[in-house]
């Protein structure tokens, strides 16, 4: 297991399966000989939470998790970034690779396009699943972090449904997709691209499985623990949370918002999806506790993100 004093470069070089985790925490390359703790501190990442996810990814051992040391807010931000990664990069890239591989098919079979349809239906199911988390679970956890106990959400019902979806849609559907390609794809002399796509499907399957495990075995138990603390302290006042730092991408979105661009225009300028723009805007308002365009403009000017002379 890795500790705060270990070198960040050691994880990056020796544990390639953790590189996606590092990216979702928005930690940079070029870390030199800095320790994990130093890199995390420089980038406003909670070190214990980062190490919990990294060590769990490597060991798959939930007994190593110390929930008292976790930052639930940091964990939530990591999971949001994971959702964005799947829908902005991983799944679209995999679809493009499948289509490119199919273009080499010289037969008239409809099976290749049926495989693409199966993949699209699968992505839609995953999207609905993760969007439910974005709209229901994550806002609930945010209220818990503010000391509230909303009655409209039952985490145990969610946990049961989440596990069922993980088993039936995340794991089973990816296995079925691989079987369809291996067993029924029309034979062709051009197999390199398809085999590469098949390999990427397996990598995506493993990545999604790890993501679901983190939600099941780290996020949900941490939520239950926080609920229990609030039950034991029913008169507890809201704790004032320190203002979170905006990520570089959130600053990019904020600058375009201040310029008056629509969500669609921002998505085009930054080469991201509208879904991600909306997610970033929610995070900006949550972190800054500023919801009006005028307030966001003032914040951007005061923090030197925009030049007042360049604004209309």
Image (cartoon, grey):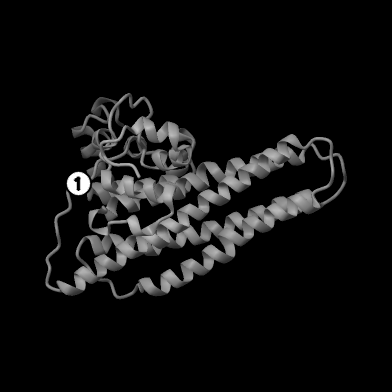
- Residue that appears at 54% across and 57% down: 126
Q: Place residue 106 in its image quadrant.
A: top right
**In this picture, residue 78 sits left or right of residue 192:** left
Q: Give the quarter of the figure containing the C terminus.
A: top left
The image quarter in which residue 135 lies: bottom left
Which element type, helix, strand or loop, lies under badge 1? loop
Seen at 26% across and 63% down, the residue is 143
Confirm whether residue 151 shows in the render.
yes
- Horizontal placement of 157 versus 116: left or right? left
Nearer to me, 306 or 145: 145
Q: Position of residue 98 (x, y in %)?
A: 69, 43
Residue 82 picture location, percent across and down: 44, 48
Q: Residue furthest front?
A: 1
Q: Would you call the spot at circle 1 few (<14 residues within 10 Å), some (14-19), or many (20 or more)?
A: few
Residue 140 visible, this angle: no
Q: Is residue 224 above or below residue 274?
A: below
How many numbered callouts?
1
Q: Is residue 144 above or below residue 83?
A: below
Name the residue beneath numbered marker 1: 243
> Along the line of sight, which residue is nearer the eye, 288 or 259?
288
Question: Residue 280: percent from the left, percent from the top?
Answer: 37, 45
Measuring from the top left, give residue 276's x and y in whole percent.
Answer: 44, 46
| Residue positioned 65% across, 40% down in the render | 96
Query: In the rendered view of the protein, which quadrant contains the N terminus?
Result: top left
Please give the name of the residue rendered at 53% of the width and 41% of the height, measured from the top-left corner.
89
Question: Of 111 and 300, which appears nearest the observer?
Answer: 111
């Amino acid at each position: 297991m890795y500790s705060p004093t270990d070198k960040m470069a050691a994880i990056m070089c020796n544990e390639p399966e953790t590189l996606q985790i590092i990216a979702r925490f928005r930690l940079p390359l070029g870390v030199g000989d800095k320790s994990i703790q130093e890199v995390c501190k420089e980038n406003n990442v909670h070190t214990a939470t980062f190490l919990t996810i990294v060590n769990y990814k490597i060991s798959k051992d939930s007994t190593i998790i110390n929930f008292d040391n976790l930052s639930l807010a940091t964990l939530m931000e990591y999971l949001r970034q994971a959702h964005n990664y799947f829908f902005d990069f991983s799944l679209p890239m995999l679809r493009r690779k499948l289509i490119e591989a199919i273009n080499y098919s010289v037969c008239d079979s409809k099976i290749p396009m049926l495989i693409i349809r199966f993949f699209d239906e699968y992505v839609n199911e995953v999207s609905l699943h993760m969007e439910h988390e974005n709209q229901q679970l994550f806002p609930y956890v945010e209220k818990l972090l503010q000391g509230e106990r909303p009655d409209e959400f039952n985490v145990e019902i969610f946990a049961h449904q989440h596990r069922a979806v993980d088993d039936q849609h995340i794991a089973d559907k990816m296995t079925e997709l691989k079987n369809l390609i291996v067993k029924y794809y029309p034979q062709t002399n051009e197999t390199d691209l398809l085999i590469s796509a098949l390999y990427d499907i397996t990598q995506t399957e493993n990545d999604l499985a790890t993501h679901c495990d983190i939600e099941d075995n780290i996020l949900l138990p941490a939520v239950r623990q926080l609920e229990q603390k609030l039950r034991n302290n029913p008169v507890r006042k809201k704790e004032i949370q320190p203002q979170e730092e905006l990520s570089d991408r959130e600053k990019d979105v904020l600058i375009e918002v201040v310029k008056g661009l629509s969500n669609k225009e921002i998505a085009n300028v930054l080469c991201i999806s509208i879904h991600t723009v909306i997610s970033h805007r929610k995070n900006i308002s949550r972190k800054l506790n500023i919801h009006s365009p005028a307030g966001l403009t003032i914040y951007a000017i005061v923090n030197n993100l925009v030049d007042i002379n360049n604004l209309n």
